[in-house]
Image: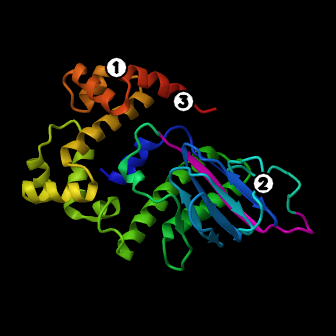
Amino acid sequence: MDVLSDVVNAARTGRPHSGRVIRSAPFALRSPAMPSAGFHIVLQGTCWLLPAQGEPIALGPGDVAFLPRGSAHGLADDPSTPVGEPPTTLTGVHDGREDEPSADRPPTVVMLCGAYLLDGSGPHPLLNDLPEVIHLPTRVGRHSELRAAIELLGVELDSDARPGSDTILLTLLDLLLLYILRAWFEQQRVSGHSATGWAAALHDPAVAAALRAIHEDPSRQWTVEELGSQARLSRAAFARRFTHLVGQPPLTYLTWWRMTTAARLLRTSDAPVNTIAQQVGYSSQYTFTHAFKRQYGAPPGSYRHHAGRSTTPA
């Protein structure tokens, strides 16, 4: 089991969306905080990302800006340009307002912008470990898979509707998200900034082996000793290492992941609660319900009802 893919699949809800955004200077737009992970990719020209906290970030051709928690931010031709009203999600094609580029006002920037809807009721600590803004500047020879996905996505958005385009776009957006996260974690490893946290955990052979075991079979009645054997470490050494990097003891993470898996099944399937309980390692529906309510603040039935209403695409 690929832990990163598993985490993304558990966090995602609804359908991702994207579009091409074109602006001519001067422009300054703001996007409010949203329950989604947003991205901006500069295809042509330049602009500035204006985080709610921190310094403006210059974006050039090929640069990727990813906001994993949907933080409020702005985009502008220059940091000094006044931010416009009203707020915009910055994820659709240009809407034809008076700043539309023309022969006299060529575009300052052409971007791909989009968002992934996320389940905010129990975000995975891997996602919480990410900074408010991930900036991946384009560099020759770096992140070739990410660059290829961006190019394919741009081509598909440029094309008139062709057979299979809906599925292709969704697949490319899924790939884009994984490539962005992979590039970030790899960048952290290479730069030496991943002494602790999930960037380190995913690249630590012992902890990664234990995480894979948990994700492959969350219903198994794992013990710390058994997980330590997967990591080829003694019980005590494994427990210390896992807790240090992941931020939770092994069995605490196991319980947390079981509940996260159960929440995904409640959102995406019609399986009875007792069946889901067994799938995540609980022989007693009562025990499962108690554990689920402790993590999500609501029993499984209520969670399913509200999650179904909140994740239905518009």
Q: Closest to the observer: 251 or 111?
A: 251
Q: Looking at the rendered structure, which numbered label has been put on residue 310? A: 3
Residue 58, by quadrant, is bottom right
Asked whether disc 2 touches disc 1, contact meaning CB atoms under 8 Å apart, the reply is: no
Residue 190, by quadrant, is bottom left
Q: Earlier in the sequence, mark 1 or mark 3?
A: 1
Quadrant assignment for the C terminus = top right
| Magenta-drawn segment | 102-119
The amino acid marked with disc number 3 is Ser
Q: Where is residue 161 in the image (x, y as percent from the top left)?
A: 71, 47
> Few, some or many C-alpha atoms within 10 Å of disc 3 (few <14, some 14-19, many ≥20)?
some
Q: Looking at the rendered structure, which numbered label has been put on residue 41? A: none
Residue depicted at 88% across the width and 68% down the height: 105
Distance from Cα at disc 2 to Cα at disc 1: 49 Å
Is residue 217 shown to the viewer in this render? no
Distance from Cα at disc 1 to Cα at disc 3: 20 Å
Residue depicted at 54% across the width and 37% down the height: 14
Asked whether disc 1 touches disc 3, contact meaning CB atoms under 8 Å apart, the reply is: no
> Few, some or many C-alpha atoms within 10 Å of disc 2 (few <14, some 14-19, many ≥20)?
few
Q: Where is residue 79 in the image (x, y as percent from the top left)?
A: 71, 68
Q: Where is residue 209 in the image (x, y as percent from the top left)?
A: 21, 56
Q: Looking at the rendered structure, which numbered label has been put on residue 84? A: 2
Q: Earlier in the sequence, mark 3 or mark 2?
A: 2
Q: Closest to the observer: 214 or 248?
A: 248
- Which-is-in-front pick, marks 2 and 1? 2
Q: What residue sits right under mark 1 in the picture?
A: 272
Residue depicted at 55% across the width and 54% down the height: 172
